[in-house]
């Protein structure tokens, strides 16, 4: 899968494609269904599959203080997309220049001159161009003029639940990791590089792998039973805290993972942490001793979770 950053990096060989446009946050089952449909149409037309997305996401650009937490950072999104039949991701920088393109210029510059799109799939609520004045009908009319079909994404449901990034965020905030996973098509996970921390955990026999999340907002917080991928061939079980660590005066979100029966140095390793069960919210404790008591209980509860999962 090829990554192209910016229109200025488009080359003649990138022209002529079946494309879709959107944030695709989470690359959930609904997104995967759209991408599968797009790949099928691309094969029948002998075209490469191109996904057009934006960094930052438009809502983060216009309203950073209230933008919802991402389910996937850009790197994580690319990791999932590699398994979705995508040939090329075109990432456009979302800035004043792009935000203020009038709809006709957006279509001409990106879809026609830049990519020579031959087949396009978008959501029927997709908006683009200055003041979000471009809509699906305008895209469809442009497609009719220039000879490429424009089709809308269909709602995808799991049971009676419509699959959406918003619904997944709600499930995560409610601690419903199973529900979120059923909409994602996989357990919710976050990734990052293991960094040095303050090493307080070592003083109480609970060393942790510390992962700075590099996110403005995080979709989960609290204590979880987790698995870490990227160290051994098999995932490693453990217990994790996501939050600011108020008991020890923390101020930024951090993912701390204690791996069971594990004592190797893994600083600098890039890992993925899957969240399997929420054990409790993050709390501020009256003392470090009280926190230590709770950590022991959290670890025992997480071990019970994994023991019961093995027995099923």
Image (cartoon, rainbow, N blue to C red):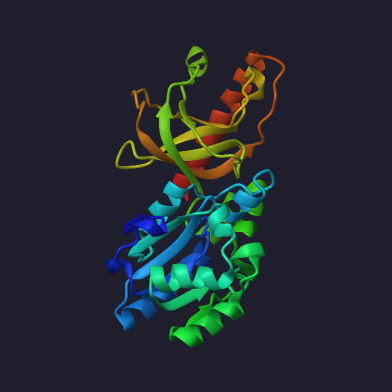
> Can you give x and y, in whole percent of width and height, for residue 94 in the image?
53, 54
Position above or below: 299 against 228: above
Residue at image position (66%, 32%) is: 282
The quarter of the picture where residue 209 lies is top left
When the figure is inspected, residue 10 is found, relative to residue 33, above or below; the finding is above
Q: Is residue 248 left or right of residue 153?
A: right
The quadrant where residue 80 appears: bottom left
Give the x, y percent position of residue 234.
33, 42
Q: Tell me if I can see residue 305 in this picture.
A: yes
Residue at 41% across, 30% down? 194
Relative depth, front residue between 25 and 184:
25
Q: How many marks?
A: 0
Q: Is residue 156 visible?
A: no
Task: Check the picture and name the quadrant holding the N terminus.
Answer: bottom left
- Residue at horizontal 46%, vertical 56%? 92
Say which of 51 and 278 sits in front: 51
Coordinates of residue 96 in the picture (x, y in percent): 57, 53
Above or below — where is 113 with respect to 77?
below
Using the image as rendered, state which of residue 181 and residue 170 is in the foreground. 170
Residue sitting at x 49%, y 75% = 121
């Amino acid at each position: 899968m090829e990554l192209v950053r910016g229109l200025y990096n488009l080359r003649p060989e990138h022209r002529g494609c079946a494309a879709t446009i959107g944030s695709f946050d989470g690359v959930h089952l609904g997104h995967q269904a759209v991408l599968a449909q797009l790949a099928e149409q691309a094969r029948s037309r002998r075209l490469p599959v191109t996904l057009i997305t934006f960094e930052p996401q438009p809502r983060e650009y216009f309203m950073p203080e209230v933008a919802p937490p991402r389910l996937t950072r850009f790197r994580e999104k690319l990791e999932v997309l590699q398994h979705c039949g995508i040939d090329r991701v075109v990432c456009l920088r979302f800035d004043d220049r792009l935000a203020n393109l009038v709809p006709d210029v957006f279509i001409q510059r990106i879809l026609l001159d830049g990519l020579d799109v031959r087949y396009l799939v978008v959501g029927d609520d997709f908006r683009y161009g200055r003041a979000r004045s471009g809509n699906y009908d305008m895209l469809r009319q442009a497609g009719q003029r220039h000879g490429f079909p424009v089709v809308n994404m269909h709602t995808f449901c799991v049971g009676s639940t419509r699959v959406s990034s918003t619904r997944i965020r709600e499930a995560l905030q409610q601690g419903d990791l199973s529900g979120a996973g059923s909409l994602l098509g996989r357990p919710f996970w976050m990734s990052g590089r293991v960094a040095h921390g303050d090493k307080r955990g070592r003083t109480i026999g609970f060393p942790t792998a510390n992962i700075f999340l590099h996110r403005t907002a995080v979709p989960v917080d609290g204590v979880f039973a987790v698995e870490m991928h990227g160290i051994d061939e098999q995932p490693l079980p453990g217990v994790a805290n996501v939050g600011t660590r108020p008991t020890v005066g923390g101020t930024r979100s951090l993912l701390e993972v204690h791996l069971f029966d594990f004592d190797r140095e893994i600083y600098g390793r890039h890992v993925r942490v899957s969240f399997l069960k929420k054990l409790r919210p993050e709390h501020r404790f009256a003392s470090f001793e009280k926190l230590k008591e709770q950590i022991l209980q959290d670890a025992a509860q997480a071990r019970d979770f994994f023991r019961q999962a093995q027995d099923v």
